[in-house]
Amino acid sequence: MNIEKARFNMIEQQIRPWDVLDQDILELLVVVKREAFVPPAYKTLAFMDTEIPLPGGECMFFPKLEARILQEILVKKHEQVLEIGAGSGYMAALLAHKARHVTTVEISPELKAMAEKNLADYGVNNAEVVLGNGAQGWANAGTEAPYDVIVISGSLPVLPDAFLKQIRVGGRIFAIIGESPSMSAQIITRVSDAAYNTVKVFETDVKPLREALTPSHFVF
């Protein structure tokens, strides 16, 4: 396989047609090598329009979804980023190239170890992988909360209020809200101490975040 040709085709045939036109993002996808974060058994799928299996029944997002998240969330060089769900570490590596620092929270010890190794092997030194359940946000002692950006790498039936409290004014949350098969990717911006602006950016369907709280469908 000609890796650079495959990467070029991924960008031109999958990512650009999905309205990812920001040249900085397209160049970042060339700089951060996706194949370095794909499990060895699935290297041949690194540039395919598919979810790539990870240990424990998890998976990497589609390449076009990763790229679209980056374009929508607009991370700046001075910003502190929280990611929920480290997976293989690829999204954290992309975010780390844009941000000052990334804290990525992973509930699976096996995936934490994978993400940590991948990030270290790739030389990413401004991303930290921590073990924990981030489905209700992440504000443990010693962390960088409040954050400028929060990226939730898994769907949620509803967005817990804890996340809203953990971003600064001007900060943004990327969240995929809803239940299969109908979910909407949203950017929630904190516009003041008490006000938030939500924009739905596209429809999708991805695996739920582990341990996400499911609201009751019954009203008493």
Image (tube, rainbow, N blue to C red):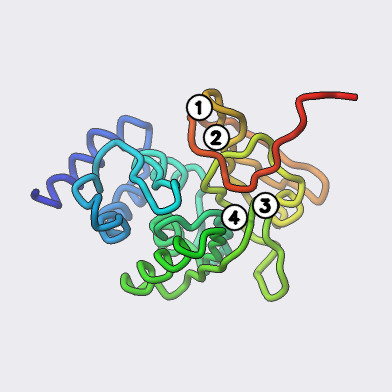
Q: Earlier in the sequence, mark 4 or mark 1?
A: 4
Disc 4: CA contacts within 10 A as few (<14), some (14-19) or many (>=20): many
Residue furthest toward the right? Answer: 220
**Residue 203 bears which disc, if any?**
1
Disc 3: CA contacts within 10 A as few (<14), some (14-19) or many (>=20): some
Residue furthest toward the left? Answer: 2
Q: Earlier in the sequence, mark 3 or mark 2?
A: 3
Question: Is 190 left or right of 132, judged from the image as shown?
Answer: right
Vertical arrangement, residue 192 with respect to residue 120, above or below: above
Image quadrant where residue 121 sits: bottom left
The residue located at (50%, 50%) in the rendering is 74
Vertical arrangement, residue 206 with respect to residue 119, above or below: above
- The residues tagged by marks 3 and 1 sit, at their Cα atoms, a distance apart of 24 Å
Image quadrant where residue 61 sits: top left
Amino acid type of the residue tagged 2 in the rendering: Ala
Whole-percent x and y of residue 32? 30, 59
**Residue 185 bears which disc, if any?**
2
Whole-percent x and y of residue 212? 65, 44
The local secondary structure at tag 4 comes to strand
Question: Is 60 left or right of 192, judged from the image as shown?
Answer: left
Amino acid type of the residue tagged 3 in the rendering: Gly
Q: Earlier in the sequence, mark 3 or mark 4?
A: 4
Q: Earlier in the sequence, mark 4 or mark 2?
A: 4
